Amino acid sequence: MIDFCTFSLPDADSTRLAGRSLIHSLYTFPVTIAVEGELGAGKTTFLQGFAQAFGVRGALTSPTYALEQHYRTPRGTLAHLDLYRLSAPDAKWLVLESDHAASIRCIEWPQRLGPQWHELIEPNMHIQLRDDGGPGRRLRCVFHDLPLPTDGEIETWRREAALAPHIAAHCDAVAAFADRCAQLLIETRAMIVRREALHCAARVHDLFRSIDFRDGASPEGFRATEEERERWRSLKERYSGVHHEAACEKFLRERGYEQLGTIVAAHGLTLPPSDEATIEQKLLFYADKRVAVDRIVSLEERFADFARRYGNTSLTVAVKDWFERTKAVERELFPEGIPKE
């Protein structure tokens, strides 16, 4: 499954903002960011934005003659390579001999490596900047740095977990709403978002919701079979002592989807601080709070429902804190107005 996003960049400022946004979608280190485009396409502008967000002070120095520049920041080391003036053999030599210890490698003109350049710099993110026929550019970001499950795998996991129909409907509704939120950010704020990773995370985020069920509890109109209840008991034993978010993270990590688990783990009450959370974590956290079963509602409606269900229990304070965190995420992501139904 290929994860990508594409959108228009009307000017240099939006190109720089797109570069800055990529910092909030990093999961794998070390990783290479390959930026492709003709002269004047905005490659350096994009990387300037990214480098500033990564903690590089001042402007990037052209590595055209030095071939490779290094920048140390609190986040790690950034290596910047420009292959424009190199032949294919020389470009391959430089890439193979470059600083693989760097957290991030940014390579301009990766096409100088030849048609199979992806094989030389895995894992990677591929940024393409193209003339869109006007004053701006068209950006396409393709992610090759983390694996994603297929729809078939997700359906198999749901069956094996005996996922209740109303929980499955909730996951699918959250996925659909998260898709819309992501597209809104892409189109209106020039933000790079891993749409497929977000969609997959949303579809599995409550995969093990049953381990938090109270014994004997069922939603109105749903009667679990004894086989389903036995499966839920088995999952509770297997993931004893953790909530469903952490259980799903562990499950995904065991199956080679560690980064997807990182997105899922933050959808409950544990969203990291704003400057540490990824954009996909924030979007899943937010979308989950906007969906009551399979209906899109306001945050006020969703948290009023929480208050009714939990009443004057010890969870009331936690729910209020949860609401304030979610409102803060909403204001951060959608300052011009929230996504509607």
Image (cartoon, helix red, strand yellow):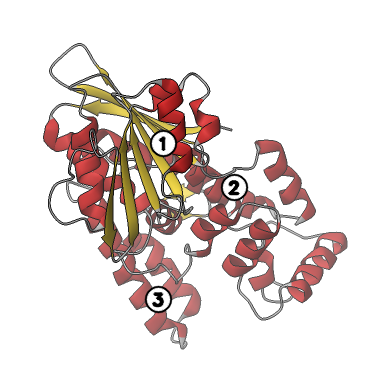
Please name the residue shown 48% across and 39% down the image.
96
* Along the viewing direction, whichever of 13 and 308 lies nearer the viewer: 13
Q: Is residue 180 left or right of 213 when viewed as pictured?
A: left
Q: Which residue is mark 2?
A: 169
Nearest to the observer: residue 221 or residue 239: 239
Q: Is residue 57 visible?
A: yes
Tell me the amino acid under the disc marked 1: Leu
Count residues near mark 1 (Cα–Cα under 10 Å), then give few for <14, some for 14-19, many for 20+. some
How dense is the environment of label 2, judged by Cα within 10 Å: few (below 14), some, or many (20 and up)? some
Left or right of residue 236: residue 337:
left
Q: Earlier in the sequence, mark 2 or mark 1?
A: 1
In the image, residue 265 lies at what x, y percent? 53, 64
Mark 1 or mark 3, whichever is nearer to me:
1
Q: Residue at x 32, y 38 (%)?
A: 81
Query: Looking at the picture, does residue 85 appear above or below residue 292?
Result: above
Q: Which mark is residue 116?
A: none
User: In this rendering, is residue 83 above or below 87?
Assistant: below
Q: Which mark is residue 319?
A: 3
Label 2 to label 1: alpha-carbon separation: 51 Å
* Mark nearer the N terminus (1 vs 3): 1
User: Residues under labels 2 and 3: Cα distance?
Assistant: 23 Å
Mark 2 touches mark 1? (CB < 8 Å): no
Residue corresponding to mark 1: 94
115 relative position to 168: left or right: left
What's under tag 3, amino acid-wise? Val
User: Is label 3 in a helix, a strand or a loop?
Assistant: helix
